[in-house]
Image (cartoon, rainbow, N blue to C red):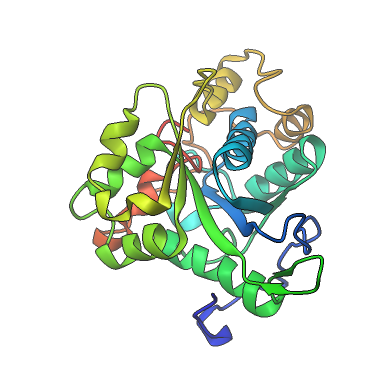
Amino acid sequence: MAAQSSSTFANPPNYTFTSHRLHRTLHASDKQPIVLVACGSFNPITYHHLRMFEMANDFVRQNTNFEIVGGYLSPVSEEYKKPGLVRAHHRVNMCTLATEQESSGLMVDSWEAFQNYQRTAVVLDHFDYEINTVLGGVSTRDGEHRDVRIMLLAGSDLISTMSEPGVWSHNDLDRILGRYGTFVIERTGSSMDQATDSLARWRNSIYPIPQLVQNDVSSTKVRLFFRRGLSVRYLIPADVIDYIKQNYLYLDDGSGPEKDKGKDKESGEAEISLRDGGFLLQL
């Protein structure tokens, strides 16, 4: 499935693709292997981010012929230029602490975080290349090779922006929704039907997932709680809380040294400003 050559992807210094939790053998040979990728700020990561993977896992098991062989968080580059966005190494470290503490299957990929801005379509291409070309995909119990389908995990409010003129290029949409596909998690205050109706040409590769337990926890609210001295226990993992306190993060509104004062990318790159938090605009 990988369509790009190794020369397409310039890796950051000392970069290694994380694959220690990638299942290399399918449990069911009649299933199509998939990897879920969530792109976003994770500023900081919350339990809601982790919960979305669980919702997708339930949906996949009960409604599809897919088998999830891995899940990744891909923190956005510092070139995002959003006020209050802490440095990439902090967000990668927090995501790593959260996944290692709270999950037995999720991983963090730092490729996007430690270089210049990368469009979502290119990030998915990177995963496709690393998993299917470099690692050689996965195998059935009988030794049959299978390519892994890379799929975006996103919130319905993010997906709704894909129909807005000038935000996403048509070629990128065709790669993201046509070549790869996406699972769309319902988000409080965002209409699922409205988010997907205008993308009808790709309806066969868009999988809406209803949110059975409403959850509006967001990174924005967590940062606000930190600034006000309020407890964030049970909103984010304990190890992440300790890391934030040890590194004096989120003590102000972003006007300090962690603040980036640049402007959003223009035109075809504008989509990056609409995927804050990985899944939804409020994160």
Residue under the image location 67 percent in, 14 percent down: 231
Above or below, 178 against 3 in this view is above
- Taking the image as shown, residue 33 lies to the left or right of residue 171, namely right
Above or below, 191 against 230 in this view is below
Residue under the image location 43 percent in, 28 percent down: 187
* Residue 31 makes an appearance in the image: yes
Residue under the image location 52 percent in, 20 percent down: 212
Q: Viewer-proximal residue, 108 or 260?
A: 108
Above or below, 27 against 17 in this view is above
Residue under the image location 52 percent in, 55 percent down: 151
- The location of residue 107, given as percent across then percent down, is 71, 51
* Residue 119 makes an appearance in the image: no
Q: Viewer-proximal residue, 154 or 39?
A: 154
Quadrant position of the N terminus in the picture: bottom right
- Taking the image as shown, residue 189 lies to the left or right of residue 223, namely left
- The location of residue 273, given as percent across then percent down, is 37, 47
- The location of residue 162, given as percent across then percent down, is 29, 49
- Displayed quadrant of residue 56: top right
Q: Viewer-proximal residue, 142 or 109?
A: 142
